Image (cartoon, rainbow, N blue to C red):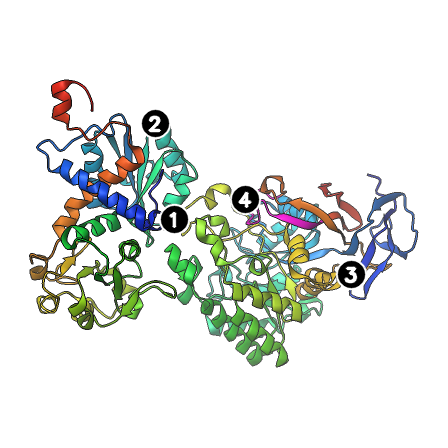
Amino acid sequence: MNRSATLAIRGGAVVDARGSRRADVLIGADGIILDVGQDLDGDRTLDASGCFVGPGLVDLHTHLRQPGKEEAETIESGARGAALGGFTAVVAMPNTDPPMDSASVVRDVIALARDVCCEVFPSAAITVGRRGESLSPMAELVGLGVRMFTDDGTGVQDTRLMRRAFEYASGLAPFAGGASITMAQHCEVTALAEGGHMNEGLWSVKLGIPGQPAESEELMVMRDIALARLTGGRVHFQHLSTAGSVAMVRAAKDAGLRVTAEATPHHFTLTDECCAGYDAVFKVNPPLRTDGDVAAVRAGLADGTIDAIATDHAPHAAHEKELPFDQAPPGMLGLETALALAHGELGLTVERLFALMSWQPAAIAGIGDRHGGPVVAGRIANLCVFDPGVEWVVRGDSMASKSRNTPFEGRAMRGRVRHTIFQGQPVVEDGAAQR
Amino acid sequence: MKHLLSIEDLGGDGITALLELTDRFVEVSERRIPKVPALLGKTVVSLFYEDSTRTRLSFETAAKRLSADTMNFSVGTSSVNKGESLRDTVETIEAMGVDAIVVRHGSAGVPWQITGWVDCSVINAGDGGHEHPTQALLDSYTIRQHCGSLRGRHIAIVGDIKHSRVARSDLMAFVALGAEVTLVAPQTLLPARLDGWPVKVSHDLDAVLPSADVVYLLRMQRERMNEMLIPSLREYTTCYGMTIERAARLPKNALIMHPGPMNRGVEISAEVAGLSNAVIIDQVKNGVAVRMAVLFLLLGSGYGLVSIPDILSNGEQK
């Protein structure tokens, strides 16, 4: 394609934090938005009639599996899936093998992500080896661009160490060009959750699968709220799944603490009853909970308690998901279904939808300078063109991910990404990846 | 019926039908030559991922008495040790042409997973802490044999309910057949949630015994102490062990049952195990007949229950 050409996105309704209005978007050859207005023409045109043209989505929680599990996903295949899902940036989780706990691994990930379909923004482990014993070289990692730290896959169990992490991170701004650093926590008290493979409740008892109680998540949410109060640190709660967690985050925000939270599409759509057929595709951590928890997560998304919808996209090879339920790894695909589920299930305005999936997560990740809008002249063109009317059926076989572990196989969806523009280039056109 | 995965799938009528069918196999088992051609030409594989002597032998005996060919896949010496997946293993076994896989696995749900991969019948011989349907059938049969019917009988299941597939399958079968079930255990050995379960719960064995028609003792595993579920085996025995003194609190003729293997001196004292109303050996005996009935129901080849000597003498089947 001609890189010196301008690109016009015509016929859609532009959406950003300032609202929505009918407008075309003209993008310059350098990838910068030249103009937003009526009847704009470019050397090339993409049709956006009937669509919303919003800032590209930002996923705070993506497992790209590289390095270590390239059979399940690579940075390239995951980024392609992200682009197809409307994302222009994903925060890569550090539970790779080796984990992203050192400058060399983070540099590798950045290098591997150079020419892929979206920005892959690496997070890094809070502790060396994600073992929860000593702090990773945070200042050095921040120097490479890391803005979010997490031991995702496990929570930092040692309360004193977590206190130190908050305190140490609060002094890292000079190494981050003044940006603030976020501690993101996978909330799970291992001592209470260990050996549990689904939500502890009526269904786990019926199925004979050992469960983990909601309290194993809630205890760590409670602890980290206390640590945020103690240290003044900024904490982001990953994949909230229980009514109790949502209530505690709401109260912490009311008290003025610096807390943010995300929730996944599977936690606002599916319940533990899905495990009834022993299909490990429905095994995920935190586990699918009850109807009451789903309602609480939805209420949290509606009232602003939860700031972002994050996918926790977690690819696993088919043979891994065919292990017995208690031996199979937890996790499910999410990138290519998240927007349609949020659109179809939550009954939000399009502005709220993009707030939860674009500018709010962009701000939490510390990449609001280039993602999350606004859609105005002078900004780099990272855009998601979403057709809310199109109907389609989820098929794992036709996904860009190298894995097939979607829990939504066969589900009828409404709303799909038509085009994704990354740094001015159409990486998805008419629902097809271009890279 | 193609598979036997769960007691729940059978329902009260299905259980009753199987127990009635079992009567005929008890009769076969008592013959001079306890073997019939009912499954001639059929192949039954036992695929046991957990150590088990009695259940595996019981199934193999049942299959042999029905003239099926039996194969035994023992995980300890197999390709599983070379990293073969469950799916590859069962697909390989099926490719050899088998009619039924009898599977035991330490993980709940494995028999269900297998039915998605193979066309042959699958029989659940115990999946994790979930179900053990043939145990429930043989236990129900044994109670029926001694008490006539389970309807209105009070059955106390005592011990580690939380981890016990026997307790789950048993209580479902007993309730389906009209019995009243009381689970007796310390709170730590009960499932996390019991709302909606048609059972009573007690922590007081001594209070339950005088009204029990059957007391069913579960095996108490030593590992449970390490999981901080009970303070000590001694304390467990003090509170929940079936001692001769406790046995004396039972109504006359009340049955004492145990799925084996017993921990003598823990959940059951040696003296109690030797009482005439302790029917533990009957359970084992009935296990073979019940499993014959299950295999016959799932795999029946058209050959009847005519005895082998009759075939040999007149050269034809009836």
Badge 3 local density, few (<14 within 10 Å), some, or many (20+)?
Answer: many
Q: Which residues are magenta?
A: A401-416
Q: Nearer the viewer, mark 4 or mark 1?
A: 1
Judged from this view, the residue extending furthest toward the top is: B315
Residue type at numbered disc 4: Ala
Residue bearing mark 1: B109
What is the secondary structure assignment of the residue under circle 1? Answer: loop
Residue bearing mark 4: A72
Q: Position of residue A151 (x, y in %)?
A: 53, 62
Task: Tell me the chain of label 2.
Answer: B
Q: Which mark is residue B305?
A: none
Q: Name which residue lies at 13% across and 59% down.
A: B264
Quarter placement of the N terminus of chain B: top left
Q: Would residue A82 be visible to someone looking at this image?
A: no
Badge 2 local density, few (<14 within 10 Å), some, or many (20+)?
Answer: few
Of mark 3 and mark 4, the one earlier in the sequence is: 4
**Between residues A256 and B193, which one lies in front from this camera angle?**
B193
What is the secondary structure assignment of the residue under circle 4? Answer: loop
Residue bearing mark 3: A373
